[in-house]
């Protein structure tokens, strides 16, 4: 199977060389656990079967970097309680439309008559608000630092145009507190991190230094091509072999060390850090999410609609939390592929293509399709 | 969710709202370039687009690599759908 895939890669020779170099450098008596933080990487890793190009003692652990996956069900229910109001148009990205709340998904609620619309950009939601001045248009904002600057610029535009009927329900989360929570978790043993590519294009490479300096774990920020990911793993293995722990940037063609200053400025102007925020599987993490600053409270859905703050425990049989923390592999969950499938997801990790469970599920089916 | 789509800037609008017309594999859409205002975006530049915003300037070679990656991942249809889905042109009628 490995070879069949490798032939399709550009630089297939380089891929094999890199894979061999990794094999040559690893300590055969050590079991390496490398976490890819970003859901986009998880998707690439499964899609290209990269685990098959690695020696058996390198284990890729799938991190919490899919924004849909880490959203607790209570936040979904809070959002849907707003969506149920008759004067509201509720807007969300496609991934969010299929995330189950306690009483169903946004799609199911829409079928029952709620005005819920799928959008591709936060600016789409603002445009709908401009076109429908008699309705309240709510953006269910979600995403890490990759997406938060876009929400920020949309809010700045709403202020500039003085759009009073546009509201943002912010569920933006921050990548670094999530990594810190994983590092501080007692059941966790990660040897190194593949840093996210597009999130880092915003925050840069420097903010990861505490992981290398304070925790002694190497970080390599990576692109999404198969060769990018293999090179990043090779860079991590080299660091470990040489006893170094540094932040290295394999994706420097897109990620500047200092990040995107305009994006960081816009985020800082519009958002402040919440004292704490609940994450699915990881519990409450302090200073890990963004809310609108008081200056923007007239556009803040949480202020305008007085959101209840619902807390819902995940369905008992679903083991999303364990999978998110890398304690269980997706297929080890009792519901995987049975009650919980991409068509009928029980947990959020089965919804987005960047969720570990959905990526794993599609990969298994892809393998079956090519006769493995 | 974190899909990044490469596109080429084909028109810059002469107002202060930081919009540009971008061409993604033949489809043209208005995107926001406010996040790159310090980078001096010019006609012909290539950018990575995420949720309707240009997030990084990239080289043409990198853009081609990225398009190839989307095809390999089987995500190019999804990417085109996303680009065609942007409906925020403030001067246009509702889509």
Image: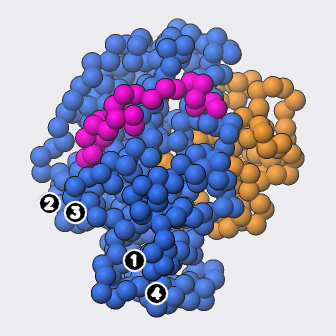
The CA span between labels 3 and 2 is: 11 Å
* Residue A137 appears in the picture as rendered: no
The CA span between labels 1 and 4 is: 17 Å
The mark lying in front, picked from 2 and 1, is 1
Residue that label 2 marks = A334
> What kind of element bears circle 3?
loop
User: Residue B83 or A291: which is nearer the viewer?
Assistant: A291
The CA span between labels 3 and 1 is: 16 Å
Tell which chain the image draws in blue. Answer: A
Circle 3 marks a residue in which chain? A
Residue B22 included in the magenta stretch of the image:
no
| A148 to A310, vertically: above or below | below
Q: Position of residue A145 (x, y in %)?
A: 52, 42
Of the two numbered discs 3 and 1 on the same chain, state the one appearing first in sequence: 1
Looking at the rendering, the stretch of residues picked out in magenta corresponds to A265-288
Residue at the (87%, 47%) spot, across then down: B43
Residue that label 3 marks = A328
* Image quadrant where one finds the C terminus of chain A: bottom left
Tell which chain the image draws in orange. Answer: B
Residue B68, quarter of the rendered image: bottom right
Of the two numbered discs 1 and 4 on the same chain, state the one appearing first in sequence: 4
The CA span between labels 4 and 3 is: 27 Å
Of the two numbered discs 2 and 1 on the same chain, state the one appearing first in sequence: 1
Of the two numbered discs 4 and 3 on the same chain, state the one appearing first in sequence: 4
Residue that label 4 marks = A25
> What kind of element bears circle 2?
loop
Q: Position of residue A260 (x, y in %)?
A: 66, 43
Residue that label 1 marks = A51
* Image quadrant where one finds the N terminus of chain A: bottom left
Q: Position of residue A205 (x, y in %)?
A: 58, 54
* Residue A25 appears in the picture as rendered: yes
């Amino acid at each position: 199977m490995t070879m069949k895939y490798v032939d399709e890669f550009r630089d297939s020779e380089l891929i094999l060389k890199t894979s061999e170099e990794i094999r040559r450098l690893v300590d055969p008596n050590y079991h390496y656990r490398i976490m890819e933080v970003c859901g986009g990487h998880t998707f690439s890793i499964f899609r290209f079967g990269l685990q098959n190009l690695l020696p058996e003692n390198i284990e890729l652990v799938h991190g919490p970097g899919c924004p849909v996956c880490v959203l607790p069900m209570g936040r979904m229910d809070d959002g849907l309680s707003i969506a149920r109001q008759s004067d509201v148009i509720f807007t969300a990205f496609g991934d969010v439309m299929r995330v189950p709340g306690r009483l169903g998904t946004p799609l199911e609620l829409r079928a029952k008559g709620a005005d819920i619309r799928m959008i591709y950009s936060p600016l789409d939601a603002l445009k709908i608000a401009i076109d429908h001045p008699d309705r309240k248009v709510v953006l269910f904002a979600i995403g890490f630092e990759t997406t938060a600057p876009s929400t920020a610029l949309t809010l700045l535009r709403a202020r500039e145009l003085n759009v009073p009927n546009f509201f943002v329900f912010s569920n933006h989360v921050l990548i670094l507190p999530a990594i810190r929570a994983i590092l501080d978790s007692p059941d966790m043993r990660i040897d190194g991190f593949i840093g996210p590519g597009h999130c880092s294009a915003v925050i840069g490479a420097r903010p990861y230094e505490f992981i290398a300096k304070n925790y002694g774990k190497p970080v390599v920020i990576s692109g999404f091509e198969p060769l990018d990911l293999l090179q990043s793993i090779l860079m991590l293995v080299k660091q470990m072999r040489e006893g170094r722990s540094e932040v290295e940037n394999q994706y420097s063609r897109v990620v500047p060390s200092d990040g995107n200053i305009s994006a960081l400025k816009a985020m800082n102007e519009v958002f402040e850090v919440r004292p704490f925020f609940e994450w699915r599987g990881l519990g409450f993490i302090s200073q890990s999410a963004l809310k609108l600053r008081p200056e923007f409270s007239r556009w803040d859905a949480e202020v305008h609609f007085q959101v209840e703050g619902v807390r819902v425990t995940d369905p008992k049989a679903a083991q999303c939390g364990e999978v998110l923390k890398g304690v269980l592999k997706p297929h080890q969950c009792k519901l995987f592929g049975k009650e919980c499938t991409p068509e009928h997801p029980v947990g959020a990790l089965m919804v987005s293509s960047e969720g570990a469970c959905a990526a794993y599920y599609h990969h298994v089916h892809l393998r079956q399709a090519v006769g493995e | 969710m974190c899909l990044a789509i490469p596109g080429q800037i084909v028109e810059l609008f002469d107002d202060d709202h930081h919009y540009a017309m971008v061409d993604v594999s033949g489809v043209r859409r208005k995107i926001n370039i406010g996040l790159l205002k310090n980078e001096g975006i010019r006609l012909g530049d290539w950018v990575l687009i995420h949720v309707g915003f240009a997030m990084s300037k990239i080289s043409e070679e990198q853009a081609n690599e990225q398009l190839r990656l989307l095809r390999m991942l089987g995500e190019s249809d999804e990417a085109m759908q996303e680009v065609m889905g942007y409906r925020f042109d403030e001067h246009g009628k509702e889509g």
